[in-house]
Amino acid sequence: MNAVVNLLSGIRKALEGFAVAARERDEFSEAMQIPGNQDYYLTHAWVNIAIGILMRNIGRTEYTITRNGKKVSAGPVHKLFSEPNASLNRFDLWKETAAWWSLEGEAFWYFGTGYSGGIPEEIHILNPRKVTMRVEGGRVVRWFYQGEGDIVPLLPDEVVHFRDWNPWNPWRGVTPIVSLKYELEQDTWANKSNSDLLKHNAIPQGILKTDQLIREEEADLIEARWEEKYGRNTKGRKIAVIGKGTEFKPLTFSPDVMKLFDLKRWNLYTILAKYGIPPRVANIQDPRANLSGTDTESQHAAFWKYTLIPVLKNFELIVETQLFKRFGFIERGHFDLTVIPELQKSEDEQSRRDIEEITNGLKTINDVLAERGLAGKPWGDIWYRPSNLMPENGLTKTKTNV
């Protein structure tokens, strides 16, 4: 009997915690003026495009598992990241994680309903919008996931939480577009205005004009005769008949309508800047800007250096802290960027600079390896001076042991 009472009490407490967490999240959204019924990934083209660019490119990277600096291709940790679960491959694992991170400012990995401790065998990605929490003593003691009709309580040890900094809630991430509320609303209204303009455009293309004063039935007769002889307008437009003293002047876009296009262009660049995406990466070229192929390559390289690589490094550290160190793994995970073409040119240029500095004695081989995060060589601290160097004052070169 006591066991049943304890079980019911635990369920009731979990449900109460879920209700409180859900209410707190709603209050937080309302305070931040985040429209709860507006999914801009669904309704805003450039938010969708920006997130798509980020997730596709992050999905191009290979996440490798290393042990003592050497790549491993077997073992439970390697298997976990190679086959996260039966319906999720290793590339989609990072694509979907990056997508939620870019959309909600956070992502959740869950080890599955069959997890009971030890090394996880599966990784499942949860929808952050369905996750709430219970906080006690300044830390999260329980997560709750709203599944298909069920509320699933999750222990913190069953979850890896990717969270971007949130000044309003230290336990949750915040969507990157929280500061773009007005820009996104302006775009929505601009799109609606443009659609209404196209939908209700009733300016006639054909006009029959006469100097005579005609009655309505005479205008209908003239229109019918015209269509009988020349055919009905295939685009669904009508023939306009105007009488004496009436003229037609075609309308052009008003200055207010033209401002909408400028506003949408400004909002586009604002959204791309928020996500760290240079215009050429999104296949946008300002007609006023004359970009060369080198400029385009620089923008693609900058996209990786200043946007994607920091995100990937953040992911590496989160997984290292919340997974590898938590379970005492000696393995570590790293994203292999050597196969990304956009970075190859800058890598080649850096290698040439390193060789020149080593040749001129400005660096040793171990200096270069340390900058790249690699282990040094036993002989790497010795500078080998080129044998063909001659002093400029004309003195005879003497043999010197190096």
Image (cartoon, rainbow, N blue to C red):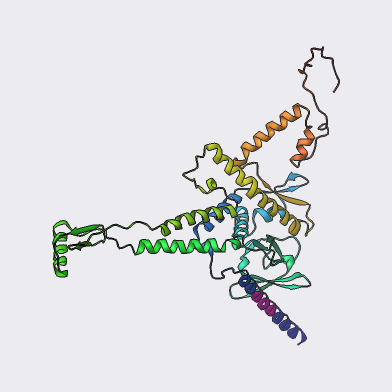
Q: Seen from this angle, which residue lies furthest right?
A: 401
| Residue 344 visible here | yes
Q: Quadrant of the C terminus?
A: top right
Could you tell whether 219 is left or right of 391 in the image? left
Q: Position of residue 169 (x, y in %)?
A: 69, 67
Point out the stretch of residues depicted in magenta. Answer: 14-24
Q: Is residue 19 magenta?
A: yes
Q: Residue at x 25, y 59 (%)?
A: 248
Q: Position of residue 99 (x, y in %)?
A: 59, 58
Of residues 244 and 347, which is closer to you in this image? 244
Q: Position of residue 65 (x, y in %)?
A: 71, 49
Q: Position of residue 324 (x, y in %)?
A: 75, 56
Q: Residue at x 82, y 12 (%)?
A: 395
Of residues 155 and 370, which is closer to you in this image? 370
- 158 to 265, vertically: above or below: below
Q: Is residue 195 magenta?
A: no
